[in-house]
Amino acid sequence: MSSSTTPPPGSAQLRADCERCFGLCCVVPAFAASADFAIDKPAGQPCPNLRPDHRCGIHTELRQRGFPGCTVFDCFGAGQQVAQVTFGGRDWRDAPETLPAMAEAFAVLRPLHELLWYLTEAVALRPPADLLGELERARAETVALTEGDPTRLRTVDLAAHRDRINPLLSRASDAARAPGGADRRGAHLLGVDLRRVDLRRANLRGALLVGADLRGADLSLADVTGADLRGADLRGADLRTTLFLHQTQLDAARGDARSGLPAALTRPPHWTALPLTPLRQPSRANAPTRRGRRR
């Protein structure tokens, strides 16, 4: 199907549907024993927790059993695309010889589906007409790439395609955030107290916010594309209009019932275990210095 006749993806197509997948996220990636994973697992080898029906045997206890890394992984719908479209529903358990090719296809389709998610979010921002047209064309081209067979998928130049897409996403962000706020692209803000910092309309693309204190922060129209929010404290933060915020970022962070979320995202279950502590303003002594704010 050509890009001119391919319909744009719906939100359901870009969301993992484990019922229609073959547990590829539990087979294809490698992981090493760490704070995120309790064991070592080589690439292409099924996780010992994967059941014969392709479901996780400890899904409801992943964090407690030492697998928090699994809870923040999202294939953006690539798993069911590989299983049901690329390989036509042929299960690797029934045809083990297909697993290497499935793994190759998954490695290409997962980043393509992630780009599709970002492009769909950018289109929804309704940027100026000329940029909107470019975004819609880029989305159609990306959809067409995802429809390739295994042989065609091997020829996809992911780096080159991503390099063409990222400037469009940046322009969409700039248009939505205008006039823009602080530019903290790629900033190293690990564990930093940001409660007194104005982050409205900020550019936080790729920022390292691991363990950052964002309690009560206003992140209205801030761009968090690729921002690392592992362990970030979002209790009471306003994220309702945050740009390009993905569910996995919330799942990796901490928050509570006061955290304002976009309608399309879900409050992670583990947030309910966090105490509803008062959101006190930090003292001057704890506020970031001028040197700490400039990046």
Image: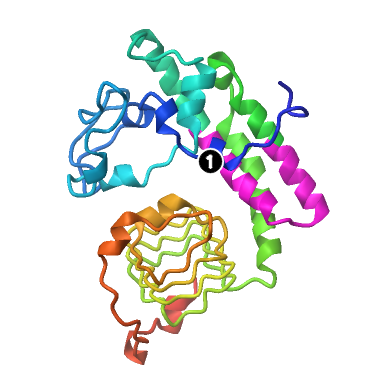
Horizontally, is 178 left or right of 216 in the view?
right
Highlighted magenta segment, given as a residue range: 110-139
The image shows residue 88 at horizontal and vertical percentages of 51, 15
Please tell me in which quadrant of the rendered image residue 189 appears: bottom left
The image shows residue 194 at horizontal and vertical percentages of 41, 76
Q: Secondary structure at mark 1?
A: helix
**In this rendering, is residue 224 above or below 152?**
below
Q: Does the magenta run of residues contain 138?
A: yes
Q: Does the magenta run of residues contain 227?
A: no
Horizontally, is 61 left or right of 3 in the view?
left
The image shows residue 198 at horizontal and vertical percentages of 52, 79
| Type of amino acid under label 1 | Glu
Horizontally, is 31 left or right of 133 in the view?
left
What residue do we see at 44% from left, 16% from top? 101
Please tell me in which quadrant of the rendered image residue 164 appears: top right
| 268 vs 141, nearest the viewer | 268
